[in-house]
Image (cartoon, helix red, strand yellow):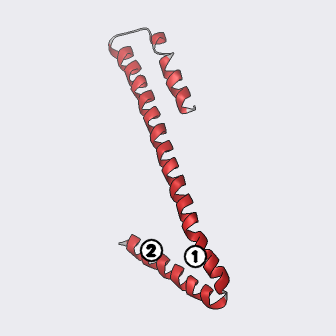
Amino acid sequence: MIQVGNYIHNMATFFSGLVIGLINCWQIALITLATGPFIVAAGGISNIFLHRLAENIQDAYAEAAGIAEQVVYFLNFNFVDPSTFLFSFPTCMHEIGI
């Protein structure tokens, strides 16, 4: 419900600013209307790239967590030498960038 109120407030602010701009200096208001869609498109494209980047980072963290979980399991229940896993975990963390 709060989002609807924010939406109405933002749209009212936009349209009232546009009307005031058209009354006071219509040339600048028309330039603003012409460049607005390009600004929105640039924001949408950057949002898509950031979303994909976040998904890739989350997948890499999940893989690293799986390796760490296997190490803990094998150390607790099988008493396996931990040096066998010490190479795969840093490699996975290196893929993340840590």
What residue appears at the point 44 percent right and 74 percent down from the top-left corner?
A: 6
Mark nearest the camera among 2 and 1 is 1
Q: Residue at x 40, y 70 (%)?
A: 3
Residue 9 in the image, given as x and y percentages of width and height: 47, 79
**Residue at numbered disc 2:** 6
Q: Secondary structure at mark 1?
A: helix
Residue 60, how many percent across, how many down? Answer: 46, 32
Give above or below for 47 relative to 86.
Answer: below
Q: Residue at x 57, y 64 (%)?
A: 38
**Total number of numbered discs in the rendering:** 2
Q: Amino acid at mark 1?
A: Leu
Q: Quadrant of the N terminus?
A: bottom left
Of callouts 2 and 1, the N-terminal one: 2
Q: Amino acid at mark 2?
A: Asn
The image quadrant that residue 74 belongs to is top left
Q: Nearer the viewer, residue 25 or 9?
A: 25
Closest to the observer, 82 or 55: 55
Which percent across, then down, holds residue 97? 57, 32
Q: Residues within 10 Å of mark 2 (few under 14, many from 20)?
A: few
Q: Mark 2 falls on what kind of element?
A: helix
Residue in view at x 54 percent, y 85 percent? 16
The residue lying toward the viewer, choosing from 10 and 75, is 10
Neighbor class of circle 1 (other Cα within 10 Å; few <14, some 14-19, many 20+) is few
Q: Hey, which quadrant is residue 66 in on the image?
A: top left
User: Is residue 27 shown above or below 4?
Assistant: below
Looking at the picture, how far across and down is residue 8, in whole percent?
43, 78
Marks 2 and 1 sit apart, C-alpha to C-alpha, by 22 Å
Could you tell me if the residues under marks 2 and 1 are in contact, i.e. CB atoms within 8 Å? no
Quarter of the image with the C terminus is top right
Find residue 33 and name its label. 1
Residue, far left:
77
Q: Name the residue at the bottom extreme.
A: 23
